[in-house]
Image: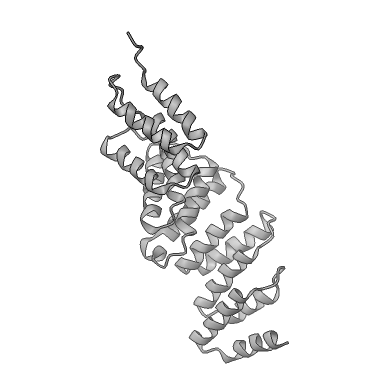
Amino acid sequence: MPMRRDVVCWTSIINGYGREGNLVEMLGLFREMLASADEVEPNSATMVCLLSACSTLSNFEVGRWVSVFVDVNAIPVNEYLCTALIDLYSKCGDMETAQKVIKLYRRMQAKFLKPDEITMVNVLSACAGLGAVGLANNGLGRDSLAVFKQMERADAQPNIITFIGVLSACNRSGFVQEGRMHFSNMIHKYKLSPQIEHYACMVDLLGRVGHLEEAYALVQNMIVPPDSIIWGSLLRACQIHRNLEVTDKVGEVLMA
């Protein structure tokens, strides 16, 4: 009589295929598990293996199918499954999945589960790094800054990528004071050197609200050479706010 395989056995083999990057075999085995005479139901660990493989291999279509399977079959969402879902959604790069990330993050908080540093960075990236106009309207900018505050309270060390997310959130949501504060903290508190992306966020933020002299001064004091995107952002802001004085200054620099 053949030995019955339990969920641990099935999950271990599925995980093996996932680690090898063999998504086709992994999904085939998962379907075999569902149809097998063993009558084994997948659990949270099984879903984590599937989602992790989809995330690593950037197969978001299959990853979304797995997430739907979790919902439809009421798979218990524990800390590890929640983290795997956040990791997948944070890489999809659209507003709908960003909102799902926030929902999952709040779900973890409601269950008093403590997200790890990587999970919080993923949440932050999903909320702030999308560059979508709808961020401010959907309230995700404020959510992403709240995640960053929790990171600081947990003594998680933010890095250059983290601050791109933070400053993007400030920029898209029009949070000028917060943007100034976080840009300053990045330099003075965390001893990180601003990159072109951080400057671009700040110049765009200041330009949007009409602080053109401040934006121009920031560009003049950049520790990396400003690129065409930064100059273009500043000039567009000058046109919108009809500031001929700063426009002339920028023109003189570009013509020099």
Residue plotted at (45% across, 25% down): 12
Residue plotted at (41% across, 29% down): 45
Q: Is residue 48 visible?
A: no
Give the number of callouts: 0
Query: Where does residue 225 sit, x and y in percent of width and height?
Result: 70, 72
Colour scheme: one colour
Q: Nearer the viewer, residue 55 or 195?
A: 55
Query: Where does residue 60 sit, x and y in percent of width and height?
Result: 41, 48
Q: Is residue 250 visible?
A: yes
Q: Nearer the viewer, residue 42 or 249?
A: 42
Quarter-wise, where is residue 76 in the image? Answer: top left
Q: Quadrant of the N terminus?
A: top left
Residue 220's place in the image compared with 73, above or below, is below
| Residue lying at the far top of the rendered structure | 1
Query: Where does residue 52 sit, x and y in percent of width and height?
Result: 46, 38
Q: Nearer the viewer, residue 83 or 166?
A: 83
Query: Where does residue 199 sit, x and y in percent of width and height?
Result: 62, 68
Quarter-wise, where is residue 195 in the image? Answer: bottom right
Residue plotted at (41% across, 45% down): 105
In the drawing, does residue 146 fall left or right of residue 72?
right
Q: Quadrant of the C terminus?
A: bottom right
Residue plotted at (33% across, 32% down): 31
In the drawing, does residue 155 fall left or right of residue 100?
right
Residue 235's place in the image compared with 53, above or below, is below
Q: Nearer the viewer, residue 68 or 113?
A: 68
Residue 38's place in the image compared with 189, above or below, is above
Quarter-wise, where is residue 43 in the image? Answer: top left
